[in-house]
Amino acid sequence: MPSRLRGKWALGITPRHFTWILKDKLAICERPGGVGESHRRVRRQEEIIWLRENGFGCVVSIIQAPHNLHNYDELQLPARHRPFNDDGVDQYLTALYPELRELLNRNVRVVVHGDEVGDRIIGVMGGYIRWSGLVDDPTHAIQVTERIAGRQLDPFARELIMRAHELH
């Protein structure tokens, strides 16, 4: 019994609010370990292990602070810090989207995390779906993104998806 338990924990635990944007290619989740007072070092480690053991080749952190980025290095999981800010959104996405496309074109499985899985990160990913040409029609892109999110998006996220195709 103890060895089986050890084996289970060796695989880590799924990050909170883990959601596929593009099945087996691109996903989002809450910051590994949690946010604020709910943040737990052991949980962070277990979630990073899960990402690594499930074939993720790159973590993209869009949180402002570079907290805990060294933990990815320690657990041999490449990570990039790309802090999202509501100021200069177009410039930010004009850099982020090609970077994501380049990683995905190299068959790198990518997870993007914010502090939480809210309308900002979902809007950014919905914008990527439209920007990449996977869904051309803006209304359909919003519907697809809302289906992925399991809820209606706020005006910021909807606007981002509506104009994502202009960012080339």
Image: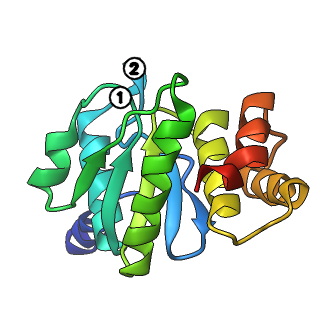
Q: Residues within 10 Å of mark 2 (few under 14, many from 20)?
A: few
Name the residue that disc number 2 marks: 36
Asked if disc 2 and disc 1 are in contact, CB closer than 8 Å, the reply is yes
Q: Residues within 10 Å of mark 1 (few under 14, many from 20)?
A: few
Residue found 44% across the figure and 73% down from its top: 104
Which element is circle 1 on?
Answer: loop
Rendering coords of residue 3 (x, y %):
20, 73
Residue 1 falls in image quadrant: bottom left
Rendering coords of residue 70 (x, y %):
14, 42
Name the residue that disc number 1 marks: 39
Rendering coords of residue 164 (x, y %):
68, 50
Q: Is residue 24 above or below residue 70?
A: below
Rendering coords of residue 94 (x, y %):
50, 48
62 vs 151, nearest the viewer: 62
Q: Is residue 64 above or below residue 27?
A: above
Q: Is residue 32 left or right of residue 45?
A: right
